[in-house]
Structures are given as C-alpha cells and as structure tokens.
Amino acid sequence: DAGVTQSPTHLIKTRGQHVTLRCSPISGHKSVSWYQQVLGQGPQFIFQYYEKEERGRGNFPDRFSARQFPNYSSELNVNALLLGDSALYLCASSPLVQGSEKLFFGSGTQLSVL
Amino acid sequence: LAKTTQPISMDSYEGQEVNITCSHNNIATNDYITWYQQFPSQGPRFIIQGYKTKVTNEVASLFIPADRKSSTLSLPRVSLSDTAVYYCLVGGSARQLTFGSGTQLTVLP
C-alpha cells in the first residue's frame, strides 16, 4: 500500500509569494494533519482536517489555510510568504480523529523562501 | 496540553540497550503516550504507543509506571541505523499532540 505522499518535495519561493502544498493520505485514512518543522526543532501542529472539516488549528497566522477534498487529499496554502516560513512541511494521515491517534507521516515538502 | 521533557541527546554503542525516559507530569486521564522516530529530511515514524504498564512490539518496549507521569522507551541492541531523533508525545488526537525538541540518539560503532 502507498504511504502518505506529498508534493512537491522541494520548493523555492520569494518573499510575498503564495505557495500550495499537496498531500494524499493513506487509502482509508480520513484525517489529515499538517505540521511545520523548522531546522533543529520538532514539528509544530498547523491544522487537522477530518471528513473535510477543520478539527483543529495550531498557533499560526491567518496567512496559513488548508482544505480537505472529498477524496481526503489535502492542500496547505500559505500567502504572503516570509523568510521565517522556510521549513519542512509535513503531512500526516490517520484512520481516527479521536482516541489514540497513530500518525503516518509523509516525507515532507522542503520550502525555502528567499 | 500535556508537556513532555526528555534528554536533548544520548550516545550509545552498537549492541547496547538504550533507554530514553520522558517525563509528563500533567498527563490527563485520557492521554496516550506515543513515541516517534525521525531521520533527517524525513517525516517522523511511529514506534510504539501505550496507556499504562508495559507495551512491547518488534522494535521497542515502552514502560509506563502506575502514576503515568513518566515513560521509558527501550531499544534493545541498537545499531548504527537507530541514530535518529526520538520524540515522546502525550495526548489523543493529532490536534492535542505536541512535539518537543526530541532526543538525539547517536549510536557509535
């Protein structure tokens, strides 16, 4: 079975631009979560979606938005990019939204903002 | 949200057993304890999860005392490929889980 897939794997943008990152969950998983990981730190929670509805949001500005599609894939959008948005963006899927979630992560999208 | 504290780094030699302890004094009744492993430029990988006492799978054991205020990940007979960052998380759903800085385990030959 295919794991969580993310695209693109690498991306270079300039300040002020907009970016869209994509994630396809494991087949059968209805929950998708997004994380930002800055070099040297642990992943920080951005969003969780379940059945196309937002179920949680981390402490990120409104420049960050996301959505989940009927096939459970998801997009993360970041507007007005700042240098500080440079990070590894991780997507994780899970079969449950409650209880003890076991997260399956993709390999991430490495975003560089110049 | 429960917060965890774990050592920043640990060194070990190949073939040894490694124990990484995580403290989580404010763990809630419904919280589970989960450990992830992460290699550079990759997403974290689930290792093991437990609620109380002891859990064992093919790669690790997780020891949780009765008060659940700490937990210990045990990796038997580590190899060079076990060099990675290990994260201890407490919580239920993804929105409750907080990754700290993790423990950098370095396995030496």
Image (cartoon, coloured by chain):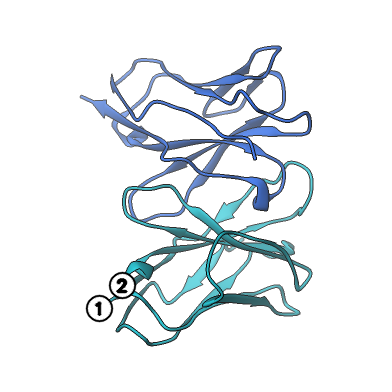
Chain colours: A cyan, B blue
Q: Secondary structure at mark 2?
A: helix
Residue A112 seen from this side: yes
Image quarter for residue A72? bottom right
Question: Which residue is depicted at the point 31% across and 72% down?
Answer: A83
Type of the residue with mark 1: Leu
The foreground one among A25 and B90 is: B90
Type of the residue with mark 2: Leu
Q: Which percent across, then down, holds residue B81? A: 33, 36
Where residue A83 is drawn, which disc sits there? Answer: 2
Q: Residue furthest left?
A: B109
Question: Which residue is depicted at the point 32% across and 54% down?
Answer: A39
B37 up-or-down from A31: above or below: above
Question: Which residue is depicted at the point 70% across and 33% down?
Answer: B32
Q: Residue furthest bottom?
A: A17
Where residue A114 is drawn, which disc sits there? Answer: 1
Q: Kindly indicate whether the residues beneath marks 1 and 2 are on one polypeptide chain.
A: yes
Q: Is residue B17 left or right of residue A28?
A: left
Q: Which percent across, then down, holds residue B70? A: 58, 19
Image quarter for residue A54? bottom right
Gap between marks 1 and 2 measured at Cα: 6 Å
